[in-house]
Amino acid sequence: MNQRLINLALAQIQLDVENGDFTAIEELLGAVPEEQLEGFLSEAVEYDDHDGQPDEAQEWESFDPDC
């Protein structure tokens, strides 16, 4: 990838953050695969995409046909 383009994008990101505008950054990150975003996070950051609802496997595991 073009290093000059990366540097310009980083400078724009810095300006956007300083101005409190995260819209373009969110759009950019939306195009990044989830595995890469998770890999980018520091090990000190705990990432859990669990929304508190059981997934399908958990629902079937606790399924009671006599209920």
Image (cartoon, rainbow, N blue to C red):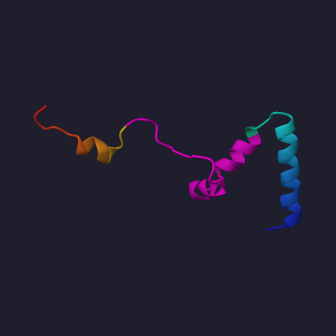
Vertical arrangement, residue 55 with respect to residue 34, above or below: above
Tell me residue 1's x, y (percent): 79, 68
Tell me residue 5's x, y (percent): 86, 60
Give the position of the C terminus as an image quadrant. top left
Vertical arrangement, residue 13 with respect to residue 20, above or below: below
Vertical arrangement, residue 28 with respect to residue 39, above or below: above
Residue at the limit of the structure toward the top, as seen here: 67
Q: Quadrant of residue 34?
A: bottom right
Q: Quadrant of residue 38?
A: bottom right
Residue found at x 66% / y 56%: 40
Name the residue nearer the viewer: 45 or 66. 45
Tell me residue 31's x, y (percent): 65, 52
Tell me residue 62's x, y (percent): 23, 40
Side (left or right) of 58 relative to 2: left
Q: Quadrant of residue 65?
A: top left
Where are the magenta residues, as a range?
24-53
Residue found at x 83% / y 60%: 6
- Magenta span has 52? yes
Residue at the limit of the structure toward the bottom, as seen here: 1
Residue found at x 30% / y 44%: 58
Side (left or right) of 44 relative to 2: left
Residue at the limit of the structure toward the front, as seen here: 44
Residue found at x 57% / y 58%: 35
Side (left or right) of 43 relative to 54: right
- Magenta span has 3? no
